[in-house]
Image (cartoon, rainbow, N blue to C red):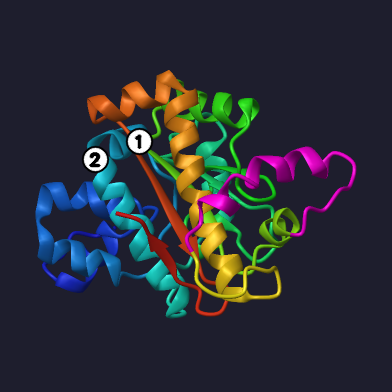
Amino acid sequence: MERTTDNTQTHHKSSRRSFFVTASAASLVGPMSLLSLQLAAPMSGSLTKEQRDRMSPAEIIEELKKGNQRFRSARMTSRDYIKEQRSTASGQYPAAVVLGCIDSRVPAEIVFDVGIGDTFNARVAGNVANDDILGSMEFACAVAGAKVVLVLGHTACGAIKGAIDDVVLGNLTGLLARIKPAIPATKFEGDKSSKNPAYVDAVAKTNVELTLDSIRRRSPVLADLEKKGSVKIRGAMYDLATGTAEFNQ
C-alpha cells in the first residue's frame, strides 16, 4: 500500500487482520485506534502467533463479545475465507476453545463473527464435557496456546428438554445423564416441565455452570492454567430469539 498521510488509508491498512487483532493492536496504539479498527473496512488473513500471544484472556473475551455485537447488529466482518484458509495451512494459533451444543442454530464461528484459525470449536448435544472433550480442551490450551475456554449454552435446547423428559434412546441416554444433575440443581418457581420455555432455559443455564465446575474439577491441567492466569474459563448463554450471547461473571 502506498504511503500517505490520509487517516482513511492508514485506517484501512491497519484493519487487514482477523477481528482478534483489534485487541492486540489496542495494547500498542490505544483505545481510540481500537474503536476505529472495530469499524474498519473488510479484513483478510488469519490470527498469527504473535498477535494471539500479545492478547490477555480478558481481551479475547471482550473480542468475542464485540464479535457477537457485530453479528446481531448485522455488521459482520467481510472475510476472504480463501486467504484465511491459505494463511492457516501451515499452522494455527486460535485464541479460544468454544464448547457448544450441536444445535444447528448456534454455530460459534458465526455468532461470534470469527474466521478460520481464530477459535477451536467442539460441539456436542447439551454442551457437556466428557473425557474426549476435556482432552481436546487441554490440547487447545496447554499445547496450542488458546487462552479462553468458553462453554456456550443456548435457549430452547432440545438436549435439556430430553433430559427433563427422561428420554431413553440408544447412546443418547448416556449423554442426557450428564445433563440431568442440572435439573435438581436449578432453583425455579413455576411449571417444571419441558413445555415451559423459562424452566428449560433455567436448567440450560445451570447446566453451563455445572459444566464449568466439571471442567475445573476433572482437568487439573486446565484448572492449573486458570489459577496461573494463563487461561480464563467462562460460560455464556446464547438467545436464539435475539442472537445475544450473555456471558457469566
Q: Does the stretch in magenta take in 45?
A: no
Q: Which residue is mark 1?
A: 147
Q: Which residue is mark 2?
A: 56
Q: Is residue 113 visible?
A: no
Q: What amino acid is at disc 2?
A: Ser
114 or 99: nearer the eye?
99
Q: Quadrant of the N terminus?
A: bottom left
Q: Which residues are magenta?
A: 165-187
Q: Is residue 142 left or right of residue 27?
A: right
61 or 118: nearer the eye?
61
Determine the residue positioned at 69% across, 59% down.
103
Can you give x and y, in whole percent of width and height, for residue 106 in the image?
A: 60, 62
Q: Does the stretch in magenta take in 168?
A: yes
64 or 211: nearer the eye?
211
Mark 2, secondary structure of its residue: loop
Q: Quadrant of the C terminus?
A: bottom left
Determine the residue positioned at 29% across, 72% down.
39
Q: Is residue 141 visible?
A: yes
Q: What amino acid is at disc 1?
A: Lys
- Determine contact: label 1, label 2, CB under 8 Å: yes
Mark 1, secondary structure of its residue: loop
Can you give x and y, in whole percent of width and height, for residue 198 in the image?
A: 55, 74
Determine the residue positioned at 31% across, 69% down.
40
Can you give x and y, in whole percent of width and height, for residue 152 in the image?
A: 51, 53
